[in-house]
Amino acid sequence: MGRGIKVKLVFVALGIAVLGLFLCDIAFGSVAISPRHIFDALWGGGTGSEGAIAPEVVRSIVMKIRLPRAVVALVAGASLAASGLQMQTLFRNPLAGPYVLGVSSGASLGVALFLLGMPVLGGSAGGEVVRNLGVAGAAWIGAAAILFMIMAVSARLKDIMTILILGMMVGSAAGALVELLQYLSPEGPLKSYVIWTMGSVANVTGQQLTIMIPVCVAGLVMSVMLIKPLNLLLLGENYARTMGMKVPAVRALIFASTTLLAGTVTAYCGPIGFLGIAVPHIARMIFADADHKVLMPASILAGSAMLLLCDVISQVPGYEATVPVNVVTALFGIPVVILVLVRNRKIL
């Protein structure tokens, strides 16, 4: 069997896994719903009952709660994985990611300034539309500010560990500012922000989805369009310049794509850690390939599958409460990061 056929078969398997986990995420929860009733709810067929639950109740659970949650997990996982792969390539750093480099911390600080800072200053977040746009805009600005700072420093400092330490220090500084805002904030906004920091794909409203999905899709399209420049960057910026690539312009596009992807997901789902750094390495292990024509779509599919799986695991059968998705992603992502450190060899 040729290499190309094997790659296609693995992609098919990944696609099937994503579809299966998507349906599982709809089926699992405090109330178990059978596949037949999921089909009935999604496509409007059948009038059977789910035990003692009326068909209209089943449809309401699926369409208003389960389906939006699964869609958010699908889009958020793909977005975090794509942004992580781009940063690992741009910085030529196998440990780069939205969480490690402080980009998620910047987005969190932006959201904190919007949710906590406005009440402290005597302002109001306004209506729901204004609040949704404000949260997203604050996250974009915060993520962009941190990423721009890291990029500016990395242009002068070539040492990988120095850049990593800088990212962690910037993230710690952002965390300190957030703690100050928490200390000064009234109880209502503080509770809202604390719940947001736990990370969840279940709290995104329909109105927020109308902002999140188009922005994330735009960021993913940009990521796919950047596949060729990312491959050139693997061989070094000097080589990329000799091949006619405008490095500053490509950096700016990667910067914009990462800001849209990581900033938007953090704004509406909270700071979900470790997916951005772990999933690209999982894709490399599965395909044993450094070509972004393979890695980018593989990371997007694997990211969706991973976050869907984490969300399924976070559901506690028979209970209304769910485990914060950040806990589950950490349990999956940390072993991958440790494996990368233990192997201690060139990844990119």
Image (tube, rainbow, N blue to C red):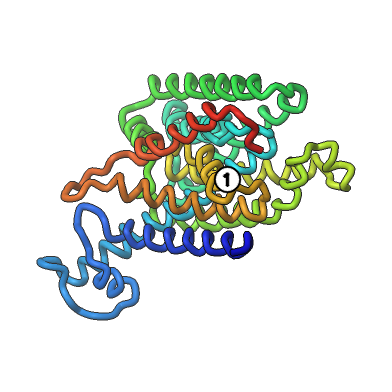
Question: In the rendering, at what x and y percent does residue 306 appear?
Answer: 43, 48
Residue 220 against residue 314 in the figure, above or below? below
Q: Residue furthest front?
A: 1
Q: 162 left or right of 111?
A: right
Callout 1, which amino acid? Arg
Residue 28 against residue 324 in the figure, above or below? below
Residue drawn at (53%, 60%), measured in percent from left and top? Answer: 11
Residue drawn at (58%, 41%), measured in percent from left and top? Answer: 84
Whether residue 203 can be seen here: no
Q: 36 left or right of 122?
A: left
Question: In the rendering, at what x and y percent does residue 261 appear?
Answer: 57, 46
Q: Residue furthest left?
A: 52
Q: Quadrant of the C terminus?
A: top right
Residue 45 against residue 232 in the figure, above or below? below
Whether residue 89 can be seen here: yes
Within-10-Å neighbours for mark 1: few <14, some 14–19, many 20+: some
Question: In the rendering, at what x and y percent does residue 235 appear?
Answer: 77, 40
Task: Give whichever of 12, 181 is nearer the camera.
Answer: 12
Task: Give whichever of 120, 307 is nearer the camera.
Answer: 307
Residue drawn at (44%, 32%), measured in percent from left and top? Answer: 334
Q: Quadrant of the N terminus?
A: bottom right
**SS for callout 1:** helix
Question: In the rendering, at what x and y percent does residue 178 appear?
Answer: 46, 24
The residue where tag 1 is placed is 284
Q: How many marks?
A: 1
Residue drawn at (43%, 59%), measured in percent from left and top? Answer: 18
Residue 287 against residue 194 in the figure, above or below? below
Task: Give whichever of 53, 118 is nearer the camera.
Answer: 53
